[in-house]
Image: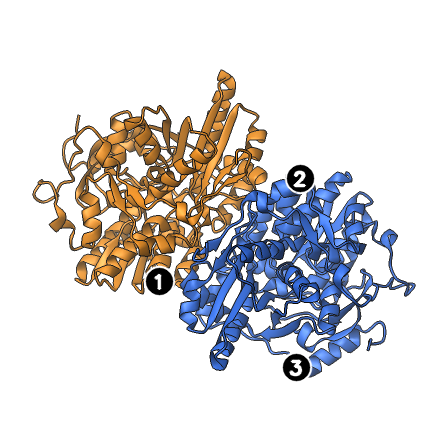
Chain colours: A blue, B orange
């Protein structure tokens, strides 16, 4: 078993529970607040948006939560996913490192997103919901939810960030193929979209704006529910199946990672790979470094401020305690659309504040250089988001070489780039920008977005 | 093991030999002929195009041929591929059938093509070749060979059929990402291309034309070799790993198929899934139906003529004994670019002539309807080529229902459609044509292409 390329699990070895890291966090987490009253929000505030099954998970403090059998059955279309030794990439890097990746690109939608799309569609279906809305950046989330909703007979409307809508038509067509309807955001379908377009008719959109539109659309219709693909506790919870599998796979080859790396947008794939290893740090005496990798041009973890902020641009969500660039921050048009988000989820923000995880930022060109090196050695072409994680793997490998220290690294291969090939074309032609953000820009964005005073 | 969704093999269970069906064919196969002399071609005639290792396989009569360890190592990036029970699709069809598919879309290039691209690049590399040429239709083959050549440090130039070059830019970008250069065919780089463009400046191209160009380019430079992604014996040989794995997977669940189905362009994925099962018919007392599925608009198996013909449009290849629509036949612009080829490989043609396999033809719209039904139940979006196999599965299921007979069906899921989403968009908008071909068109094409008299 030790020299295999792919460490596999049989279906019967697939974990049957998700891991809720909140149970193992020592400090009390700050509550999200109702923006009108300033009071902590409760389940009732969330009821117009989410089914009870998901709200219960959102506020749960249970350590483990059972994965429903119907969800397990669908997971088995592509799960357990392989843990792969990147042996050719290691050889190329010529550093004293073992590199493994958890290949989440094997799902029908090509990313880790179906891990939460399927249970979200399931809990809605169980409570009789027939119609849902959501937003999507690069289209990974929208296509995953389209796939999941189709399996449960739920109609889905997706607000897709306009710049991605234009850059990635294939993602739209995927969503259509799975029966969903797709609208470029900002749109004229919502008051939020109209407001943004009135201010800037050429707005490229952002996840924050698309969230505003999708929420507004769901709230308007009593029978429609909303779904978010990242940030929230229940979303991160569902993704932990990634790390739970990885731990079992490392056991099979008698290894354990020194560093766990995931790219970072709202936190879902990062949480998925890292939380089960973080449990090893919190409760199992392990000392694994956990590294979140964000884009240089959207640096909320490395240069943002920890304060209460809205999750969307218009201000329709609760106020969430998080590292943020300000909810009015519109990230530059990088191709890693899934990382173009102004804030981090509350759990991740707390973990970063408590020094339990690290964060780093990678410029767009460095990320694509890493992705090309990976594709030319391991074969698989990574998503632009995933390229950020790979670039950090290269940095870690180079550091290990300089220091002469052996390391075992695992990263989450969050998705493939086959629907993002135009980005690779532009990179190969030297047309990509790194979009530097000045301190002044960040300061102004945070100031103009501040609703409540900063937290210490 | 019986109720699993995916039947897996561990890497150590991966077959270590390819299966050469020629060893089990009772009748003597007709030789390919030198067009100048009319004499059977020998290894020397092939030496300017292929390395010795592949020429030996092309003419071999050994039943089993060892897979080199270096090739096995690369296969393990994605192999063994899963055999998947299409349980949700079965439920949708509501027929007395068990349906399995061999998922070849899990390779880095997204199709079965790397199964032969890797050994072809390997044997060239072993003999010191540093530069290769090939052609590609939809881009599946070109991208597979780009991936394989990159791993062995070989430069690759790909002539891509112009209609696909325009319809599928993402495939070009994939090839570029793996370091290959891509030219739209017909091009001005070759005499063959110039000749075609002089006759029809708007020529959409065809596999036949692209083959002419790639061969000319390889022959011109003594150090450059050529590679073909289908038709030839050694190509079909390499693909048999698909069926060899499938047989081992069916053993694990104590099943055996009544019907084996593959879509059909030049024969490589069809041969790959079916030849090992055909061995069961020829030597093991099995009685499995083996069905090749071609597009309605390129019907060489169902409406072509068995005669000597060129493999390319200009007439640079040997004369091959095959079912053909005439080498001058330019197939309509269907999206299943990998099936747009005028002839069938010599082994397949002989098997069809001997009544050992069946053939059927599917119109383009029926194929996409099948693909959509599959995507909406099983999740994975199939390649347009694969949709033809799925449409035939539906026909078989409906027949089984009418006849009240239980059946176990397996088909080759030759590739995913994520780089072909524009085709799905057009289908969903009702913009696809079935491109009917009249008997008169076929008659004229065959007559104008005839070099030697028809064979009985």
Name the N-terminal-most of marks 3 and 2.
2
- Seen from the viewer's position, the closer of residues A145 and B246 is B246
Looking at the image, is A126 positioned above or below residue A166?
above
Q: CA distance from mark 3 to mark 1?
A: 40 Å
**Labels 2 and 1 touching (C-beta < 8 A):** no
Looking at the image, is B297 positioned above or below residue B158?
above
Q: Is residue B159 left or right of residue A68?
A: left
- Image location of residue A59, percent across then percent down: 81, 55
- Image location of residue B366, percent across then percent down: 48, 33
- Image location of residue B11, percent across then percent down: 42, 49
- Give SS at disc 3: loop
Q: Which chain is mark 1 on?
A: B
- Seen from the viewer's position, the closer of residues A103 and B95 is A103
Quadrant of the frame with the C terminus of chain A? bottom right
Looking at the image, is B81 positioned above or below residue A355?
above
- Check if mark 3 and mark 2 are on a common chain: yes
State which mark lies toward you, 3 or 1. Answer: 1
Label 1: which residue?
B150
Q: Is residue B445 visible?
A: no
Q: Is residue B281 left or right of residue A84?
A: left
Residue at figure coordinates x 35%, y 62% from the top left: B150
Q: CA distance from mark 2 to mark 1?
A: 42 Å
State which mark lies toward you, 3 or 2. Answer: 2
- Image location of residue B106, percent across then percent down: 46, 49
Residue at figure coordinates x 38%, y 58% from the top left: B147
Q: Which chain is mark 2 on?
A: A
- Check if mark 2 and mark 1 are on a common chain: no
Q: Quadrant of residue B346?
A: top left
The label number, if any, that marks residue A70 in the structure image:
2
State which mark lies toward you, 2 or 1. Answer: 2
The label number, if any, that marks residue A438 in the structure image:
3
């Amino acid at each position: 078993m030790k020299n295999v390329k792919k460490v596999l699990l049989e279906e019967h070895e697939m974990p049957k529970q998700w891991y809720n890291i909140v149970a193992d966090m020592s400090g009390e987490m700050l509550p999200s607040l109702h923006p009108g009253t300033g009071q902590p929000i409760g389940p009732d505030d969330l009821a117009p948006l989410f089914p009870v099954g998901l709200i219960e998970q959102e506020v749960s403090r249970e350590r483990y939560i059972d994965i429903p059998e119907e969800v397990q059955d669908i997971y088995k279309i592509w799960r357990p996913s392989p843990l792969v030794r990147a042996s050719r990439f290691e050889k190329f890097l010529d550093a004293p490192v073992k590199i493994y990746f958890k290949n989440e690109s094997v799902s029908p939608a090509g990313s880790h997103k179906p891990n939460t799309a399927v249970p979200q569609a399931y809990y809605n279906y169980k409570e009789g919901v027939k119609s849902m809305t959501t937003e999507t950046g690069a289209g990974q989330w929208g296509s995953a939810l389209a796939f999941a909703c189709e399996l449960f007979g739920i109609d889905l409307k997706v607000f897709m960030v306009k710049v991605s809508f234009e850059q990635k038509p294939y993602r739209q067509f995927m969503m259509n193929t799975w029966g969903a309807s797709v609208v470029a955001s900002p749109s004229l379908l919502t008051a939020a979209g109209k407001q943004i377009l009135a201010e800037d008719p050429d707005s490229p959109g952002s996840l924050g704006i698309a969230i505003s539109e999708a929420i507004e659309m769901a709230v308007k219709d009593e029978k429609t529910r909303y779904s978010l693909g990242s940030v929230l506790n229940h979303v991160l919870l569902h993704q932990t199946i990634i790390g739970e599998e990885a731990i079992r796979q490392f056991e099979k080859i008698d290894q354990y990672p020194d560093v766990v790396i995931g790219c970072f947008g709202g936190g879902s794939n990062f949480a998925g790979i890292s939380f089960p290893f973080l449990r090893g740090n919190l409760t199992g005496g392990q000392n694994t470094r956990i590294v979140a990798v964000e884009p240089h041009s959207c640096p909320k973890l490395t240069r943002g401020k920890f304060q209460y902020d809205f999750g969307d641009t218009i201000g329709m969500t609760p106020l969430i305690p998080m590292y943020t660039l300000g909810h009015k921050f519109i990230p530059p048009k990088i191709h890693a659309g899934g990382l173009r988000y102004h804030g981090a989820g509350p759990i991740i923000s707390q973990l970063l504040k408590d020094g339990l995880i690290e964060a780093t930022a990678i410029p767009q060109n460095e990320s694509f250089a890493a992705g090309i090196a990976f594709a030319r050695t391991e074969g698989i072409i990574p998503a632009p988001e995933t390229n950020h994680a790979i670039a950090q793997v290269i940095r870690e490998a180079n550091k290990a070489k300089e220091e002469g220290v052996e390391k075992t690294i695992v990263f989450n291969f969050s998705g493939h780039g086959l629907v993002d090939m135009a980005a690779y074309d532009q990179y190969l032609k030297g047309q990509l920008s790194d979009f530097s953000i000045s301190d002044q820009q960040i300061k102004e964005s945070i100031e103009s977005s501040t609703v409540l005073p900063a937290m210490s």
